[in-house]
Image: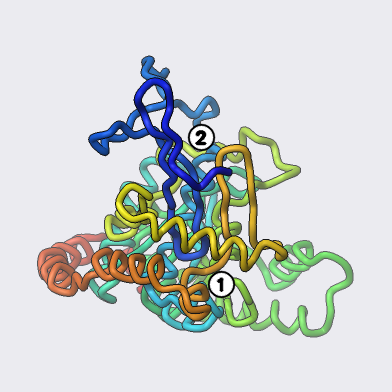
Amino acid sequence: MDLEPVYLDNGLIRMPCLSVSPTAVTAYTRLMDFNGNFKTWNTGIKPPCENKEKGFISKKGQKALERAVYWFLYSVDPNIVNSGKGKEKITFLTLTLPSKQVHSDKEIKDKCLKQFLTEIRAKYEVEKFIWKAEKQGQGQLHFHILLDKYIDAKEVRTIWNRIINKLHYVYEYHKKMNALSWSDYRDMRLKEIKGKPSEKDKQRIRKAYKAGCAANWMNPNSTDIENLRKVGNIAAYVGKYMSKEHKGIAKENLKVDGRIWFSSQSVSKMKNLLLVAADDMTYIEEFADMIKRYQDTNKVYESEHALMLGVPIDQLKYKGYKTIPEEFAQYCRELFSPVKQKVIEFNQAVKQEIKQIINNEPKQLQLCM
C-alpha cells in the first residue's frame, strides 16, 4: 500500500489516513480535495443498508460489537486489554429466564432488562455497559452484559429475580419445582450431566436441592457471573463470547425480535481516532517505521486497500514511539472525561422512581427479595 499522497487527474488527492484503536493502527486512503474536504469514492446514491436476516446479528454488527467491547475494557482500565490485569473492575454476567418464556422479546427487554439496568446504574453508579440478547436452544431469551463495576453475584440474582417476577417467571418456576420430589429433581439434574456423574456432581445436586427447598423455590439460579480469572486475553474472549454463533441449533429458534445489542452512550461515542497525513506527515512517517520494525512478525496484515499493525497502542508507546501514542492518549482523555456528576444526577432522579416500582409490586411477587 502506498503511504504517500497521490495526486489524481480529476484534481483530487488520494490521502493516506490512520485509524487508531486501543489494539491496532490501520492505514488506508481517502479522497480529498485541495481544500481538505473528504470526498466519496462513488458520488451515486447508495442503496439503503439493511440486514437481510432480521433477528440475527450481521457480520458488520459483530465487528462493531467486538470494537465496542475493546473500547469498553480499555476505558475501564487499559491493563485489561494490554496485560489481562484489572479484571476485578468489571462484571461479565448472564441473565436468563427460570421458566418457559411466554412474553415477547420486546416486552422482556422493555419491562425487565431496562429496569435492571436502571437499578444497577443508580445503586452501583454504573456508567458504562454493553448488553447482547441471544436465544438458547429452546428459544429462551437471555442476555450477556458487561458492566464497569464489580457487583456481587447474590445481589445481581436478587435484583433480577424480583424484576422478572413482575411477569411471573419466578413464581412459575416455584410451582414447577415445588411439585418435584427429591428423586424427580435428582433425575432431572443428572440428565444434564454428560457422561457418568461423579460423587462431586451428586453432592452438588443434593446441596442445590436443599437450597431450593430452603428458599421455597423462589430464588432460582437465573444469573451467572463469568469467572475471568484464568482468561488471558479478556478483550478477545468477551468480544467473541458476546458475538458468537450457535451451531447445530435450528436457526428459527435463535431469532431475536428487536434490538440485538446495545451500549451506554459513554461507550457508543468511543470511535477510532482518525489521523490524516494532510494534517501532519509525521503520523505516516512514524507508522511506516512501525511497519518496518514489525514486518517480520505476524502483527502486520495487508490487504488491497489497507495496512494494519495489530499491536496495542500502549505497547508502541513503550517501544519509544511518541506522535501517534500521544495523540491517542489526548483523544482518550477527552473520551473518558469524568462524568461522575451526571451519574449522581441520574441516581437522584431514578432512586425514588425505583422505590415506587418496588413498593407497588404485589406482595406475592416480592417473596424472592
Q: Quadrant of residue 229?
A: bottom right
Q: Is residue 104 above or below residue 315?
A: above
In-image side of 12 versus 305 (left or right): left
Q: Is residue 178 visible?
A: no
Q: Is residue 163 visible?
A: yes
Of 111 and 333, which appears nearest the observer?
Answer: 333
**Labelled disc at residue 55:** 2
Q: Residue at x 25, y 74 (%)?
A: 125
Q: Residue at x 39, y 60 (%)?
A: 282
Q: Is residue 273 above or below residue 321?
A: above
Q: Quadrant of residue 105?
A: top left
Position of the C terminus, as image quadrant, is bottom left
Query: Is label 2 in a helix, a strand or a loop?
Result: loop
Of 59 and 141, which appears nearest the observer?
Answer: 59
Q: Quadrant of residue 188?
A: bottom right
Judging by the rendered image, the residue that carries numbered circle 1 is 226
Q: Residue at x 23, y 35 (%)?
A: 35
Residue 285 point in image, percent of width and height? 46, 59
Mark 2: give few (<14), some (14-19) or many (20+) Cα within 10 Å.
Answer: some
Residue 136 point in image, percent of width and height? 61, 49
Callout 2 amino acid: Gly
Residue 310 point in image, percent of width and height? 58, 61
Callout 1 amino acid: Glu
In-image side of 88 versus 305 (left or right): left
Which badge, 2 or 1, is on the more N-terminal residue?
A: 2
Query: Is label 1 in a helix, a strand or a loop?
Result: loop
Q: Residue at x 42, y 70 (%)?
A: 74
